Amino acid sequence: MTIKNILIYLSSRTELPLLSKFTLELTNFYNARLFALTIIPQAKTHLKTRAEEHAWRKLYELEEDAFEADRKISLLLEELDKVNQKTLTSKIIEIALSYKIDLLVLPDNIKLQIPRLLKELGIPVLIFPISKTLKKENLNKN
Amino acid sequence: MKKISELIVPEGIILDIKSSDKISVIKELSQILIEKNMISDPNEFFEAILKRENLESTGIGQGVAIPHARTKAVKNIVVIFGRSQTGVDFNSLDGKPSHIIFLIAAPEDKKTEYIITLAKLSKFIRKDEVREKLLKATSKEEVIEIIKTHE
């Protein structure tokens, strides 16, 4: 199986360090190009402005990690009129198809229509257990 | 945390970039940093900024590119603004040439500030109104005023 393009979706609640490390190792293993995507609401409000800056921060944090790991990365920030499980899933499908994505990485703390993603994309979808990994890390610290 | 308008100085604004390709544009903008003694080692800075350009596209679409680097060669975070009438190919994902170019240089130990500056700038420049005004600005002072008003 050839994996040339990997897409990672980052939500505003995504804890980056472990997911970033995992995804970059995966990208390195396949010698693939990484696309990082965040999606924010389109409404022109103060909240949107904050959400957008926060989203860019997540993207640039990952970009910096990718740079340090010598991996190719492209940053994508998309907007949606209404953000819900259905529209988010549709947008991720649209982006994955347009960039010919071969593997999708998702954090486990977002709600998406996973069966629909699998059916319409026909590619592997890896769901990274952020919440469990964080709990384990906290237990180890204590 | 400084605002973008505080990181950019009139000498760091070029309203009509002469170069036409990505590498030359980066060198033209970086020349200001060298002339103003803002980088201790030009070669190290070029190497860092060009390495990133080789790894990824700093063209963020909508006619904008933000080449950037964080290295020991830089003394303080600084933003340089350049405008190209003809547009420069920064390999943007939307395929459009970049007419507005912000170059960001940051010291190695200022990672958080550097990322926040990149995020603030990327958010600010996605506003249609800002890009239109920057493309029409007739003086360096006007560019700074536009940034102050909209950041």
Image: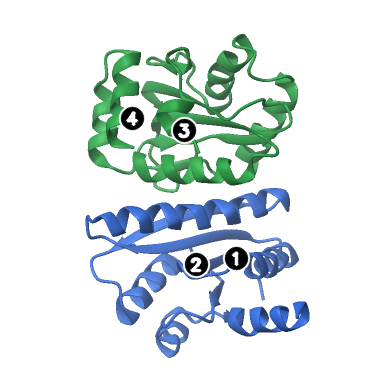
Chain colours: A blue, B green
N-term-proximal mark, 4 vs 3 = 3
Mark 3, chain letter?
A: B
Q: What residue type is labelled 3?
A: Asp
At a point 66% along the width and 54% down the height, the residue shown is A65
- The numbered disc on residue B147 is 4
Which quadrant: the N terminus of chain A? bottom right
Mark 4, chain letter?
A: B
The image shows a total of numbered marks equal to: 4
In this rendering, the label closer to the viewer, 4 or 3: 4
Distance of mark 1 from mark 3, alpha carbons?
31 Å
Distance of mark 4 from mark 2, alpha carbons?
29 Å
> Are both tags, 2 and 1, on one chain?
yes
Mark 2, chain letter?
A: A
In this rendering, the label closer to the viewer, 4 or 2: 4
Tell me if residue B62 can be seen: no
Residue tagged by mark 1?
A16
Q: State whether residue A85 is above or below residue A13.
A: below
Q: Residue furthest bottom?
A: A115
The reply to whether the C-beta atoms of the residues labelled 2 and 1 are less than 8 Å apart is: yes
Distance of mark 4 from mark 1, alpha carbons?
30 Å
**Pointer 3 local density, CA inside 10 Å: few below 14, some 14–19, many at least 20:** some
Residue tagged by mark 2?
A10
Q: Which amino acid does label 2 sit on?
A: Leu
At a point 22% along the width and 37% down the height, the residue shown is B129
The percent coordinates of residue B126 (x first, y second) are 33, 44
